[in-house]
Image: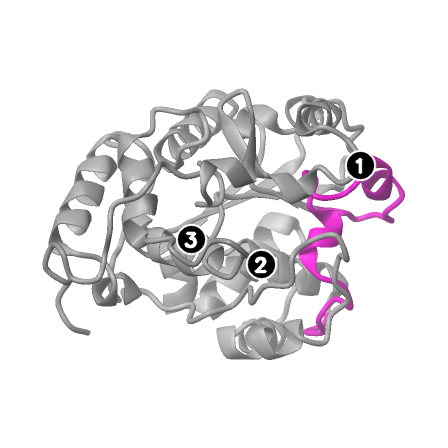
């Protein structure tokens, strides 16, 4: 891949952006410093929804996938779904049907066990019973540069976002001290893992999953406590290859109140080199230095 672009090549200045999904502030509603798309507020204010998430009654066999946007939540959700089902078949519905901030809590409560819940909320907004019932948590993270580019392309699909730029995302990620920033999200997750050693957390990077998917599938099966033969692990790794998931997603049942956007773009490691300026890359490097001491390994190429 080519080098990062020089400052001024195709990027403009812009306003700050919503901290959770990289969108402009006016399109977001904020709860305790964390930004959520306004279209999540279909039935009730987001603040009330977060309170309901915290109070959600969990089951001991629940699995919660908690990750910052564009880090691989869909990937781990599909993989987990296949492992618990014991076969490399796609779920008929998208993961958003079990996304705690996107649907009514009653819909979550009605789902049969084992539930594979997912969310982009920071760890302090998870159901309180995660600690008491020691519910399994899966956390997938990704290098901040590819997250930046992925957030940019995802946000640009929404109406009224034609002038959105990567600089807007970078400015927010670098300048934000909000509880919803990516750096704070990771700091809080690291603190949670270290402070709650009895809560099982599967901590994995997007890059490791991309590099050796069969190994990650096998490790995840052990974490979930399910038997998965080498053949099944290979089948699941193949089914959850990016191109295959992208094709399968078009045939899934979708939540009607969410915008119809392309969730899968490239799924590559290192695509940031084609879109970020040298200055932007350096500012994001400085951001990562804030995470010194956290148990995350960031890789920008494979």
Identify which residue, 261 or 139, lies in the foreground: 261
Residue at (58% x, 49% y) in the render: 223
Locate the C terminus and report the quarter of the image it occupies. Answer: bottom left
- Of badges 2 and 3, nearer the viewer stands 3
Residue at (77% x, 57% y) in the render: 256
Q: Where is residue 168 in the image (x, y as percent from the top left)?
A: 32, 45
* Residue 75 drawn above or below residue 133: below
Locate the N terminus and report the quarter of the image it occupies. Answer: bottom left
Judge from the rendering whether residue 3 lies leftward or rightward of residue 133; answer left or right. left
Q: Which mark is residue 115?
A: none
Residue at (71% x, 22% y) in the render: 51
Judge from the rendering whether residue 216 lies leftward or rightward of residue 84; answer left or right. left
Q: Are marks 2 and 3 in contact (CB under 8 Å)?
A: no
Measure how far apart labels 1 and 2 are at the Cα level.
Answer: 24 Å
Measure how far apart labels 2 and 3 are at the Cα level.
Answer: 15 Å
Residue denoted by label 2:
74
- Of badges 3 and 1, nearer the viewer stands 1
The picture quadrant where one finds residue 10 is bottom left
Determine whether the residue tagged by mark 2 lies in a helix, strand or loop.
helix
Count the marks: 3
* Residue 121 drawn above or below residue 284: above
Q: Where is residue 236 in the image (x, y as percent from the top left)?
A: 60, 72
Please provide the residue range marked out in magenta.
87-116
- Of badges 1 and 2, nearer the viewer stands 1
> Closer to the N terminus: mark 1 or mark 2?
1
Determine whether the residue tagged by mark 1 lies in a helix, strand or loop.
loop
Residue denoted by label 1:
43
Q: Do the residues labelled 3 and 1 touch (CB within 8 Å)?
A: no
Residue at (63% x, 74% y) in the render: 232
Determine whether the residue tagged by mark 3 lies in a helix, strand or loop.
helix
Q: Residue 151 carries which label?
A: 3
Identify which residue, 131 or 33, lies in the foreground: 33
């Amino acid at each position: 891949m080519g080098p990062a672009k020089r400052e001024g090549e195709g990027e403009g200045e812009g306003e700050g952006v919503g901290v959770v999904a990289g969108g402009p502030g006016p399109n977001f509603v904020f709860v305790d410093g964390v930004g959520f798309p306004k279209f999540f507020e279909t039935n009730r204010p987001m603040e009330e929804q977060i309170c309901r998430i915290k109070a959600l009654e969990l089951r001991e066999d629940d699995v919660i996938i908690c990750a910052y946007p564009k880090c691989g939540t869909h990937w781990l959700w599909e993989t987990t779904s296949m492992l618990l089902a014991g076969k490399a078949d796609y779920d008929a519905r998208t993961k958003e049907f079990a996304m705690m901030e996107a649907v009514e809590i009653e819909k979550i409560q009605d789902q049969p066990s084992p539930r594979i819940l997912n969310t982009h909320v920071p760890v302090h907004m998870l159901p309180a019973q995660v600690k008491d019932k020691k519910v399994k948590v899966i956390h997938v993270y990704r290098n901040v540069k590819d997250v930046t580019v992925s957030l940019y392309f995802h946000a640009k699909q929404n109406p009224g976002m034609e002038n959105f730029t990567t600089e807007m995302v970078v400015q927010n990620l670098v300048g934000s001290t909000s509880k919803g920033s990516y750096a704070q999200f990771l700091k809080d997750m690291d603190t949670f893992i270290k402070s709650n050693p009895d809560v099982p957390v599967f901590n994995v990077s997007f890059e490791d999953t991309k590099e050796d998917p069969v190994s990650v599938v096998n490790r995840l099966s052990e974490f979930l406590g399910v038997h998965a033969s080498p053949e099944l692990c290979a089948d699941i790794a193949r089914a959850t290859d990016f191109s295959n998931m992208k094709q399968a997603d078009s045939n899934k049942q979708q939540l009607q109140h969410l915008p119809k956007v392309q969730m899968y773009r490239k799924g590559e490691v290192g695509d940031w080199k084609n879109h970020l300026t040298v200055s932007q890359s350096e500012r994001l490097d400085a951001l990562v230095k804030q995470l010194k001491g956290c148990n995350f390994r960031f890789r920008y190429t494979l």
